[in-house]
Image (cartoon, rainbow, N blue to C red):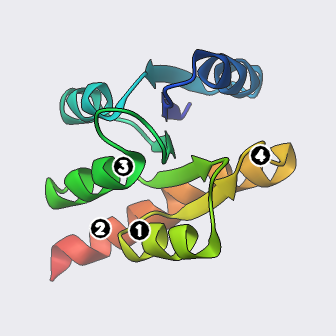
Amino acid sequence: MAKILIIDDEKAIRSTLRDILRFENYITDEAADGEEALKKLQTNSYDLALCDIKMPKMDGIEVLERAKKDEIPTPFIMISAHGTIETAVEATKKGAFDFIQKPPDLNRLLITIKNAPKHCGLWFQNRMKF
């Protein structure tokens, strides 16, 4: 069973995502900001992180950059209500698996969640061989 870290400063968003993911039999954990997320990513193993972009203290792009710099193998799906094509491109260039706008299309979100750990796990394993 996959374990997903939900990173969002809005409690209602975290709760909604948690309920949806638990209904789909995922294990969830939550972080209310980027600093808390990094601590959890450094001390726990996650199959995936759903990460908001606009957050206080440390935004989602910064969390993604730090996780990649620290070689944390957790795939990231970035989510944002304020997303633009430029933001999506920036996030994927910096290592995000995908970018989904809020409110997310439930079917797209679940398919992306299903595919990310498989795809990114192979990518990370291959990267470590070189």
Q: Is residue 117 above or below residue 119?
A: above
Secondary element type, mark 3: loop
Using the image, tell me which numbered label, if any, was put on residue 104.
4
Question: Vertically, is 125 above or below 126?
Answer: above
Mark 4 near mark 3, Cβ–Cβ under 8 Å?
A: no
Mark 4 to mark 3 CA distance (whole Å): 21 Å
Q: CA distance from mark 3 to mark 1?
A: 12 Å
Residue matched to label 3: 74
| Callout 4 secondary element | loop
Residue 77 visible (yes or no): yes
Label 1 Cα neighbours within 10 Å, binned few <14 / some 14-19 / many ≥20: few
Q: Give the foreground label among 4 and 3.
A: 4
Quarter holding the N terminus is top right
**Sequence-earlier tag: 4 or 3:** 3
- Binning the other alpha carbons within 10 Å of mark 4 as few (below 14), some (14 to 19) or many (20 upward) gives some
Disc 1 secondary structure class: helix
- Label 1, label 4: how many angstroms apart (C-alpha)? 26 Å
Asked if labels 1 and 2 touch by Cβ distance under 8 angstroms, the answer is: yes
Residue type at numbered disc 2: Gln
Eyeballing the image, is 82 above or below 32?
below
Quarter residue 44 falls in: top left
Residue 125 got which mark? 2
